[in-house]
Image (cartoon, coloured by chain):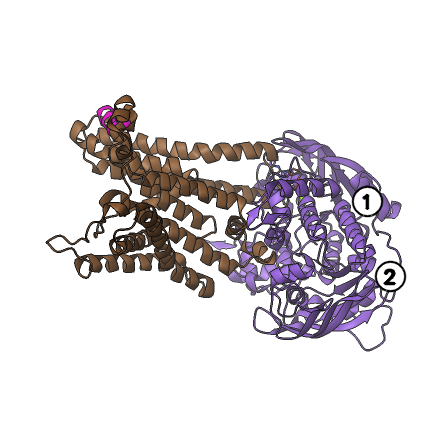
Chain colours: A purple, B brown
Amino acid sequence: MPVLELRDVTKVFPGVLANDRVSFSLERGEILALLGENGAGKSTIMNVVYGLLSAEGGEILVDGQPVRIRSPRQAIDLGIGMVHQHFMLVEPLTVTENIVLGREPGKYGVIDFKTARMRVEEISDRYGLKVDPDARIVDLPVGMQQRVEILKALYQGARVLILDEPTAVLTPQEVRELFRVVRSLVDEGLSVVFITHKLEEVMAVADRILVMRAGRVVGETKPADTDDIGLARMMVGRDVVLRVEKGESVPGEPVLEVSDLRVMGDRGLEAVSGVSFSVHGGEVVAVAGVSGNGQTELVEAVIGLRRPAGGTIVLKDADITQANARRSIEAGVSHIPEDRHRRGLVLQFNLAENMVLGDHRVAPYTNAGIMKPKVITAMAKKRIADYDIRTPSETVSAENLSGGNQQKVVVAREIGRNPDLLVAAQPTRGLDVGAIEFVHRQILEERANGKAVLLVSLELEEVLSLADRILVMFEGRIGREFGPGEADAETLGYYMTGGGGEKLSEDAPYATTAEVRASSGTGLQDGARGEAE
Amino acid sequence: MTEAHETTPIQKRWMGAALKVGTPLISAALAIGVGSIIVWASGYDPGAAFAALFQGALGTPKAIGDTMLKSTPLILTGLAVAYGFRAGLFNIGAEGQLFMGGLATVALGLALGDVSWFLAVPLMIVAAMAAGASWAFIPATLKARIGAHEVITTMMFTYIGRYLVGWLVNGPMKEPGGIPQTYALPANAQLPRIASLFSEGAKGAVPLLNLGRAHLGIVVALLAALAVWLILKYTTLGYENRAVGYNRWASETAGISVQWTTVKALCISGALAGLAGAVEVMGVHHRLFDQFSSGFGFTGIAVALLAKKHPLGVIPAAFLFGALAAGAGTMQFQADVPQKIISIIQALVIFFVAAEEIVLWFVRRRQKEAMSHAG
Ligand SMILES: Nc1ncnc2c1ncn2[C@@H]1O[C@H](COP(=O)(O)OP(=O)(O)O)[C@@H](O)[C@H]1O
Ligand SMILES: [Mg+2]
């Protein structure tokens, strides 16, 4: 008998059919992957199960018994736990305090912390979820915080654990750790629903895969019976190219030349320590690395948001070392920021206003300080058509677009400016396969047009599929450079975590993330907090 | 996070537009409603009170003139505060900038001597705007350079400005005699009353031209509103102002100098407040004294909020406050209701506008929470 079964569950939001007669079951000891593009309805259906949303129709059975789940409280009582993408922890409190919150052991309102702490340790030992029970949440990296969330669900007696996009915020190393944890959970007889839009993850972790599209379950399969391509097709509903074909690289003249660059980080420590490299026209150079190893500061120096402490940055023949963002744009640098909501878009602006951002002071969009709405509108309309941005019109504000379409607005603007150098920082973060394919195509298109592209990414897959040359950045330095076809994911991962020098064996000794952090002293920064949209 | 549209974008836009216009109306209506209850509970007849208020504010051409007179500085201070808001700045010190504007107007007007009106008035307006801007410049620089909060600094400069004027009209600029005030401006340095521009014949034919004390400053104020609207909508200056107000990081990334934009925004805001001082002096009092502003700079904050920070919305919002002020006297002597009631209604308008912001804030927060649950 399945531990959880859904029959024809339907959930309607005003104007959106978020779940359309969704049915599936979850067996004991099983990892069920729920795969689908952003907006497919994955979170919604699981929020219904967790009692956060109430469905308009259908039935939910737990252990074969029909149940009505009206609140997370009831879900927890039924043994259903859920870890959301945005953690719901109380930051100043300790791990133990957070875990027992709401179910504190003790009498007369006095919490028995000793018992609490013991139980937390007991659970964390049983499932191999190591975490310091006395650490405060604020001091923990995201991966650890997630672990606390999982522990909390287990403490509350979850037999069914729902993980909503759990890998979005993790580094590759943390992802592996999580997979191991999930495995040990099902070995202990729990059942896990693993929500994701990443294909490699379902292939790696799932026992069974349920694919959702536009609110419906469109297919069910097993990792052994399918491959990336098949899954992508099911997910998107058309053929998707996962690894965009790219032609031979024909590097031209050097466009960007960085020498001995030194940049200070926010905390007054040197974040980039003497980095030199060049990017030629017609070439994609990728900077790979674990988040927080100086990539953000490097990018900010190149695009003029941060004054370097030393070294030079030359674009074509112009020295732009000390250029500010405005001069950098005027010199021919475009930038796809890693955080589109913070740096890429003014969400309250409409699409036309967003498309002209950065070009708003120059012809043909402006003449003597007066903007030209007609020209701007025409440009926006053209780009909306060219880049297939799904929107009713260019007067819609950017906040009303889906994440993928927002990113298309940024890409359209930055590429549309016709730059010499495109600096793309995590350009596909949080996007789903269809949108990723689009962005990758655009980047390669720029390359084909003889533009120089500097790609900074935490996604090895992305780096490997786009880059002509790969620079591995660790602790503010470029450890190694790889030419075309010289590196695979394992090798890169090894160098990204500070390895190097000695010969690699088949199973390279990976530093755990905790070790990496301890040695680099930086830890995860914002950059790693990928948000799936 | 997942986009959680409760509605389609198009619906949202219409709802947004309706909210923009509708909620201020509701705030104003609620204020008047609660005001009536207070009038009634104090033992007066609300019907008679509001009839008198209406009579005094709009009942006759002269009353309309009074409302225009009272609205004029409020349009300008409302614009000043609204322009700051649009850059994410809260210029709470428009009052001080207005004082400096008034001071510059009088100082220049008295010094100019016998020059043409067409030269004197524009010069005085420019001087007043420059004075208001300069009074905002130091707070603006402190904000841009070291992040000193403009609420504190502009307020402090308001005290400085007021005491400076107080001292000047009691000392160096004082007209001989018992009253602490400056000499009066000559006619070539005044803004004439609108009624004075028409012949008696014309006013006989069109009674509406008997606008009493309303002066040309209203035209200046309306033109300023139009100008601010055009600036925000059609110039790079306004575009950058709005961009910085919404998202300084995206602005910075796009090569907009956040610091410079901040300085410009506060100075323009100060210039508009200075202009308010100029028209008040040139159109109403024709001289400077300690009490020449009845808190226009502060009421301007309420006007800007009621206007939803929109430069054209400032006009009806200022008109409402102006009408309340103009009708207060009539209400007192016709319905025997104390003028203070008007202050209460004004306070209620501010309260309901603020309350609406609070309600909206909660709505947005709940939406965000719903999104993170779904996300
Ligand atoms: N709270 C909400 N209110 C209105 N619409 C929502 C809400 N949450 C999600 N939606 C809509 O429901 C659909 C499914 O969303 P969701 O379940 O979050 O997708 P997924 O998790 O698969 O990315 C989307 O179209 C989304 O915009
Ligand atoms: Mg989701």
Q: Which residue is farthest top?
A: B205
Q: CA distance from mark 1 to mark 2?
A: 31 Å
Does B51 appear in magenta? Answer: yes
Which of the two discs, 1 and 2, sits closer to the camera?
2
Does B75 appear in magenta? Answer: no
For image coordinates 77% across by 63% down, the residue present is A286
Q: Position of residue B340 (x, y in %)?
A: 21, 38
Q: Is residue A166 left or right of residue B281?
A: right
Instruction: Tell me if residue B333 comes above or below residue A503 in the rendering.
Output: above
- Depth check: give the residue in front, B245 or A51: B245
Characterize the magenta stretch by its predominant secondary structure: helix
Q: Which residue is farthest left?
A: B178
For image coordinates 24% across by 36% down, the residue present is B213
Q: Is mark 2 within 8 Å of ligand 1?
A: no
Q: Which residue is mark 2?
A: A250
Which quadrant of the figure has residue A234? top right
**Residue type, mark 1 in image:** Ala
Per the image, label 1 sits on a secondary structure element best described as helix
Per the image, label 2 sits on a secondary structure element best described as loop
- Depth check: give the residue in front, B18 or A131: B18
Q: Which residue is mark 1?
A: A232
* Residues rendered magenta in the picture: B47-60
Q: Are marks 1 and 2 on the same chain?
A: yes
Q: Quadrant of ligand 1?
A: top right
| Number of residues whose C-alpha sits closer than 10 Å to that of mark 1, classed few (under 14), some (14–19) or many (20 or more) | many
